[in-house]
Image (cartoon, rainbow, N blue to C red):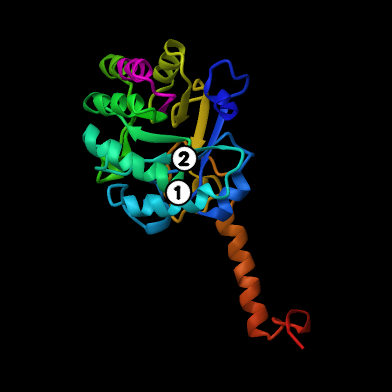
Amino acid sequence: MKKFKILHKSFSKPISCLTAYSPSIAKILDGKVDLILVGDSLGSALYGMKNTQGVTMDMMKSHGAVVNKEIKKSLKVLDMPYKTYDNKIDAYRNAKILLYHCKPDLLKIEINEKKLVVLKHLVDKKINVISHIGVTPQSYKNFNKIKVLGRTNKEKQSLLKLAKKSETLGAKAVLLECITTDTAKLITENISIPTIGIGASRYCNGQILVFDDLINLSTNDKKPRFVKNYFNFNKIVGNVVKKYNKEVKLKKFPSSKFSYY
């Protein structure tokens, strides 16, 4: 598949990835980034959840399906939600549901040693999987307790081992979240599939951010260190709303231009 060339390390440029939860955002992003992820981060971004554990299959099906319709060029990635892949039987059943309704190119699952058997089973069933290691948000009820991994040699070697096993079992890429720069560099240099980082330094083969963070749409003032705002949506749109409100109050809107006769 032509689009899958970007998931080979021979691909000449770093991989870019952003999240999308709605068709309008997906349409804007399509073809401008390599991968578009319908992430379970929609729990906090759209539903005001404190973590991702409340995200359901129905939520992922709904958002995944509408986003899929607008993506023609970028690779489509979909998160499997919390508790839907605890064992290989549930994982395959739920994966088939998501693939049927949303038609993603790849599914992403959060991996630890116990979940490697699930990764293997999905790959054996010819499903394209991205292995998410490092900080795995579905493991946390309280995101304030998240800490960077890879600072000790034990953590570093454990993450490297997990990345190598993910590659051996057939993962298409490894997503590294919130790990130290030297750990990300070590992993990237020692596996042949791409690494995609979020809070994992420039040494990864690609980068991902939540779109809402990219444009400062989030109302959360306490953002992780790795978040860079490229556009202050809150400030600019706030001024637009004030202008609209003023025109309504002064009866300047709607003018004859915006009225029917």
Q: What residue do we see at 57% from left, 23% from top? A: 5
Q: Residue furthest top?
A: 190
Residues under numbered marks 1 and 2 in contact, where contact means CB atoms less than 8 Å apart: yes
Q: Is residue 140 magenta?
A: no
Circle 2 sits on which residue? 104
**Disc 2 element:** loop
Instruction: Give residue 106's position: percent from left, percent from top.
Output: 44, 34
- The range drawn in magenta is 160-176
Q: Pick whichever, 231 or 105, lies toward us.
A: 105
Quadrant where the N terminus is found in the figure: top right
Instruction: Give residue 66's position: percent from left, percent from top.
Output: 50, 53
Q: Residue furthest bottom?
A: 261
Instruction: Give residue 40's position: percent from left, percent from top.
Output: 38, 46
Q: Is residue 169 magenta?
A: yes
Q: What residue do we see at 46% from left, 13% from top? A: 192
Q: What residue do we see at 57% from left, 44% from top? A: 71
Task: Tell me which numbered mark, 1 or 2, is placed earlier along the sequence.
Answer: 1
In whole angstroms, how far apart are the C-alphas of marks 1 and 2?
8 Å
Indicate the amino acid at tag 2: Pro
Instruction: Give residue 254's position: percent from left, percent from top.
Output: 70, 82
Disc 2 crowd rating (10 Å Cα; few below 14, some 14-19, many 20+) is many
Q: What residue do we see at 39% from left, 27% from top? A: 126
**Disc 1 element:** helix
Circle 1 sits on which residue? 64
Q: Taking 244 as reference, is 212 left or right?
A: left
Q: Pick whichever, 173 or 248, lies toward us.
A: 173
